[in-house]
Amino acid sequence: MMFGSPLPKDEANQWRHQLNQFVKENEKDLAALAWGLLQEWGDSAELAFSPNQDALGIDLQPSPHFVRCSKESLDQLNRQLDQKIQEILGILEKYNAAEEVAIVGIGEGQIKLIYFKPQPTPPQCFEEVGEDLSGLIEKLEKRMGELITVKSQ
């Protein structure tokens, strides 16, 4: 797609554009959630993402919700897809969770990497947002449900 061109009319991929819009509108809350969950799931003393660390995902079926993606399940998916998501796995293994956010978007038969560097950093976003993880998840899933519509094929 060329810059400045209108969004494609392809409804099967519309979720990608809606997900991008959701991320743009909720960047600080997503950074806070990603940081908080990674701390809950792993060694909170370690600032960088661990190669064995699980990843945060957004599953759009049956309605948009957050999921925990294990390293093993992502590796298995990569093998099933003949290594076609190797670049995504490389980013997930090497990004710095204290400075960047990486989330796997899961649509029907498709995945999308959500990757951004928020200002302020994810730990600062977590402190500033000041919500518990359950409340943050509930609020963000509600917003996703309002913004992202997925048509089954």
Image (cartoon, grey):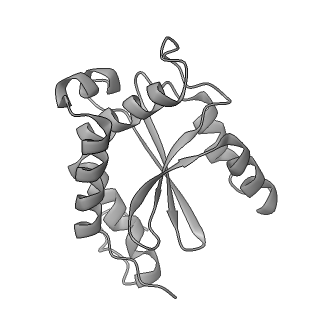
Residue at x 25% of width, y 67% of height: 147
Q: Position of residue 77 (x, y in %)?
A: 73, 57
Total numbered labels: 0
Q: Where is 133 relative to 98, above or below?
A: below
- Left-right relation of 15 to 72: left
Q: Position of residue 89 (x, y in %)?
A: 65, 43
Residue lying at the far top in this picture: please name it.
Answer: 45
Residue lying at the far bottom in this picture: please name it.
Answer: 153
The quadrant of the rendering that contains the N terminus is: bottom left
Residue at x 61% of width, y 46% of height: 88
Residue at x 29% of width, y 74% of height: 6
Q: Where is 32 relative to 98, above or below?
A: below
- Left-right relation of 71 to 2: right
Quadrant location of residue 84? bottom right
Front-most of residues 114 and 151: 151
Q: Position of residue 62 (x, y in %)?
A: 45, 74
Q: Where is 109 relative to 80, above or below?
A: below
Quadrant location of residue 148? bottom left
Q: Position of residue 139 (x, y in %)?
A: 22, 51
